[in-house]
Image (cartoon, helix red, strand yellow):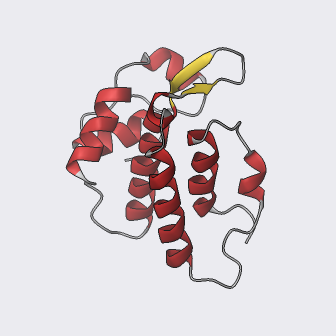
Amino acid sequence: MGHSPVAGNPYYVTLAQGGGPDFSLFAQDQIGDQQPGDVYAKGASDVLAAWQTEGALQRQMPLPGGGMGPRIADLHLLEAVLHGWDLATATGQDRTGDPDAVKAAMTGWYGNFPDEARVRTGMFGPSKPAPELDRLAAYFGRAI
């Protein structure tokens, strides 16, 4: 299956435990002959346990250019919320998201980076008036 969205959970298990980023996980088949939902559920259980270990929630993200970035847990939450929006949008489902998770992601991320800087990267879009999770999704480059 190549690049698998379920690789995010084992990726964050390693980071929560203090390991370095292992991008090779995204090039591996994480599903094989298993059911994707079962693989995701196991990964979610594993990563939840990893976040509950001593010091995991305080770890910061090493940035490619050097220095430390946001707490890894905050980044994982943002990715889970945004990829949930991606999946709901792609499948025509309700994309309002879990209110507590959306609020936490909005509080931690939305408005922290000026539009001019974000749009120049080509990865992010301009802010737009919309429901909260749609605004967060647009802020991180999704078309709404």
Judge by depth and name the residue closer to the eye, 51 or 103.
51
Residue 124 or 28: which is nearer the viewer? 28
At 38% across and 63% down in the image, what residue appears? 88
In the image, residue 115 sits, relative to residue 103, either above or below, namely: above
Picture coordinates of residue 7 (x, y %)? 63, 58
Whether 79 is drawn above or below 127: the answer is: below
Q: How many labels, in total?
A: 0
Q: Residue 30 occupies which quadrant of the picture?
A: bottom right
| 81 shown above or below 90 | above
**Residue 16 sits in quarter:** top right
Rendered residue at 71%/61% (across/down)? 3
The picture places residue 78, in percent across and down from the top left corner, at 43, 41
| Residue 40, horizontal then vertical, whole percent | 52, 68
The single residue placed furthest to the front in the displayed view is 54
Residue found at x 57% / y 34%: 123
Q: Give the percent coordinates (x, y) of residue 85.
A: 39, 54
140 lies above or below 119: below
Q: Is residue 111 left or right of residue 30?
A: left
**Residue at x 73%, y 72% (from the top left corner):** 1
Quarter location, residue 135: top left
